[in-house]
Amino acid sequence: MNVLFVDDQISVLEGIAAGISFQELGIDVVRYATGAEHAMDIMRATPIDVMLCDIEMPGEDGLHLISRAQKLYPELITIIMTSHADFEYAQVGVRLGCFEYIVQPAPYEVIEGVLRRALQHCYEQKKRNQLYKVGKWMQTGEMELLDRVAMNLFSSDASDVQASMELLNLIGYAV
């Protein structure tokens, strides 16, 4: 899983980098951005599963960034992480479909707990999408499905290979 933290305060990003046990959470890639455009550049270059974002930043604020990112990456899980305990911000976050609203300063354990829940949600969402695809493929016939799986096993994209292995296990072919 890949996570992006967006905050214009470098000290906040440094604290998160030092205080969160990313490996224990199963996070593969952690990226940090100091503004909205920097965050968008990172998302264009690296698939991001979860984005934790401050609200008030110079230039484009975090709420606009979340809105823009969700349009481009609809499966992105977004979490607001801000020092502003403002009800209006929370309302906008709910309308945007944010997963959680963390008021800073928050203990690292709280951030880790939210990340753990978000990553579990992301994993379950990916499984549901995978099962949906299997169902669609099964409608076209099992042989076509197996052909597609076999082709993906030789893909240069590691996620295609992993998805094919999981799919084979799911439909009863032990791999």
Image (spheres, rainbow, N blue to C red):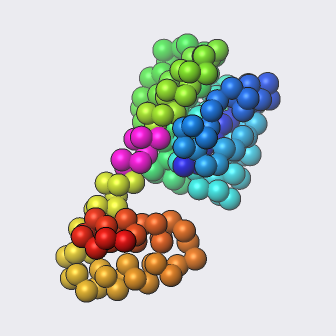
Residue lying farthest right? 10
**What x and y, as percent, mark residue 156?**
58, 77
Q: Position of residue 115 (x, y in %)?
A: 52, 33
Q: Is residue 12 visible?
A: yes
Percent x, y for residue 41? 71, 53
Can see residue 68? Answer: no
Q: Nearer the viewer, residue 167 or 136?
A: 167
Above or below — where is 28 with respect to 161?
A: above
Q: Residue at x 53, y 20 (%)?
A: 110
Q: Locate residue 125 relative to residue 47 in the image: left or right.
A: left
Quick check: is 120 in the magenta stretch?
yes
The quarter holding residue 163 reads: bottom left
Q: Residue at 73% of width from left, 29% of height from top? A: 18
- Whether residue 89 sits left or right of residue 21 in the image: it is left
The residue positioned 72% from the left and 32% from the top of the image is: 17
- Residue 41 shown in magenta: no
Give the answer, above or below, for where 84 lies relative to 23: above
Of residues 59 and 110, the one nearer the viewer is: 110
Up the image or down, 92 lies above or below 103; here it is below
Looking at the rendering, the stretch of residues picked out in magenta corresponds to: 119-125
